[in-house]
Image (cartoon, helix red, strand yellow):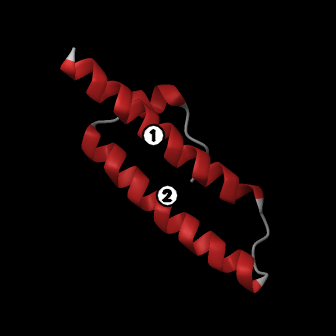
Amino acid sequence: MAELKVDDIRAMSEDQMSDAIANLKKERFNLRFQRATGQLENTSRLREARRDIARIKTVAAQKRAAKTK
């Protein structure tokens, strides 16, 4: 999965965001195992996945805050 852009995330619905977070968490889990076994070639992908999760959670929180105002 390529790095997500904020504009792409803002266009997602809440269900799509939760699905994307779940997929990224699975990917991150697999990447951690690959790193532990020495099979991981692109080590920067771990950082990207972690930041993508944070980016999605931030946009989701902003959307929730906008709804309550």
Asked where in the image residue 28 lies, by quadrant, the reply is bottom right
- Neighbourhood count class around disc 1 (C-alpha, 10 Å): few under 14, some 14–19, many 20 upward: many
Residue 49 % position (x, y):
59, 53
Q: Residues within 10 Å of mark 2 (few under 14, many from 20)?
A: many
Q: Residue at x 65, y 49 (%)?
A: 48
Q: Earlier in the sequence, mark 2 or mark 1?
A: 2
Q: Residue at x 28, y 36 (%)?
A: 13
- The kind of secondary structure element at disc 2 is helix
Residues at circles 2 and 1 in contact by the CB criterion of under 8 Å: yes
Q: Position of residue 59 (x, y in %)?
A: 42, 31
The percent coordinates of residue 41 (x first, y second) are: 79, 69
Rendered position, 15 above or below 26: above
Look at 48% across and 62% down and name the residue there.
Answer: 25
Quarter containing the C terminus: top left
In the image, residue 3 sits, relative to residue 42, either above or below, namely above
| Pointer 1 residue | 56
Horizontal and vertical percent for residue 54? 52, 43
**Residue 56 appears anywhere in the view:** yes
Residue for badge 2: 24
Q: Quadrant of residue 46?
A: bottom right
How far apart are the two marked residues, 2 and 1, measured between alpha carbons? 10 Å
- Residue type at numbered disc 1: Ile
Looking at the image, how many numbered discs can be counted on the residues?
A: 2
Q: Residue at x 57, y 74 (%)?
A: 30
Left or right: where does residue 54 sit relative to residue 15?
A: right
Q: Residue furthest left?
A: 68
Q: Which amino acid does the dot numbered 2 rest on? A: Leu
* In the foreground, 42 or 32: 32
Q: Secondary structure at mark 1?
A: helix
Where does the N terminus fall, quadrant-wise? bottom right
Kindly tell me whether residue 11 is visible in this rendering.
Answer: no
